[in-house]
């Protein structure tokens, strides 16, 4: 019962779509996932130092799983954490602006948590105004609060997501990467899971 209550409390605080841990992650299916680097992130020392983590790789390699696992460890340690997709983050801010609550929502919901996890950067392009909102979040959290970001795009293509604004994207990446742990994952984690279970046929090559 205590474990169940802990899971529910963690899920409520972090707003995770599901509870994931490193015990559930199969490193053998995600080429390039450096176990030592990920284990270091789970110590949460990067949060104490106000550093960031960026998880890069194609769809299906377990980026979200790892981000949630680290965030879950943070909530277990009593660290206020928020998990949100990039698309939902923008929708939340736009709704707050329409309701004239932008500053309050930004201050309490986005800047307040010591760890902000933004998932799926690059899946949907942002307009110029939306890109500016995201830049403001990065700028205000710089060296004050940690972030974990996940993306299916290499950094060289991030300007395509952020309104095609190369200047803004460069300034944003400068702040994100100044104190950052970069985890580059290759391979097909979820696809290989499905093949292992017999749901997807293996390639003959």
Image (cartoon, grey):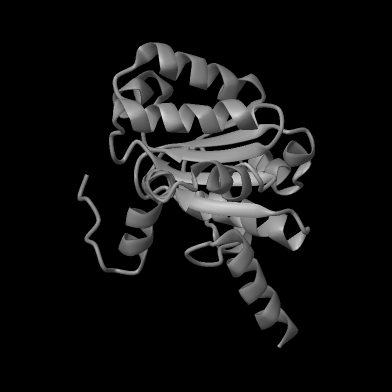
Question: Residue 45: image x %, image y %?
Answer: 78, 40
Question: Residue 161: image x %, image y %?
Answer: 32, 29
24 or 94: nearer the eye?
94
Left or right of residue 47: residue 163: left
Question: Residue 158: image x %, image y %?
Answer: 37, 25
Quarter placement of the C terminus:
top left
Residue lying furthest front = 100
155 or 124: nearer the eye?
124
83 or 189: nearer the eye?
83
- Residue 78 image-quadrant placement: bottom right
Left or right of residue 179: residue 165: left
Q: Is residue 125 visible?
A: yes
Q: Residue at x 55, y 43 (%)?
A: 106
Question: Residue 111: image x %, image y %?
Answer: 62, 41
Q: Residue at x 42, y 47 (%)?
A: 61
Residue lying furthest bottom = 1
Q: Is residue 33 visible?
A: no
Relative to 175, is 57 above or below?
below
């Amino acid at each position: 019962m205590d474990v169940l209550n802990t899971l529910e409390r963690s899920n409520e605080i972090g707003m995770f779509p599901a509870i994931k841990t490193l015990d559930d992650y199969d490193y053998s299916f995600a080429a390039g996932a450096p176990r030592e680097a990920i284990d270091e992130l789970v110590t949460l020392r990067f949060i104490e130092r106000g550093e960031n983590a960026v998880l890069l790789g194609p769809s299906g390699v377990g980026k979200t799983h790892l981000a949630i696992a680290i965030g879950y460890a943070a909530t277990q340690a009593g660290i206020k954490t928020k998990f949100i997709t990039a698309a939902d983050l923008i929708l939340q801010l736009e709704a707050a602006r329409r309701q004239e609550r932008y500053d309050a929502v930004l201050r309490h919901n986005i800047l307040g948590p010591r760890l902000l996890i933004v998932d799926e950067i690059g899946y949907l392009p942002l307009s110029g105004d939306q890109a500016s909102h995201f830049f403001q979040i990065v700028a205000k959290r710089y060296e004050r609060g940690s972030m974990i970001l996940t993306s299916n795009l290499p950094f060289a293509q991030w300007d395509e997501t952020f309104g095609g604004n190369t200047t803004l994207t460069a300034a944003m990446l400068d702040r994100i990467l100044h104190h950052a742990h970069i985890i580059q994952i290759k391979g097909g984690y979820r696809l290989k899971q499905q093949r292992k279970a017999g749901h997807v046929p293996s390639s003959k090559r």
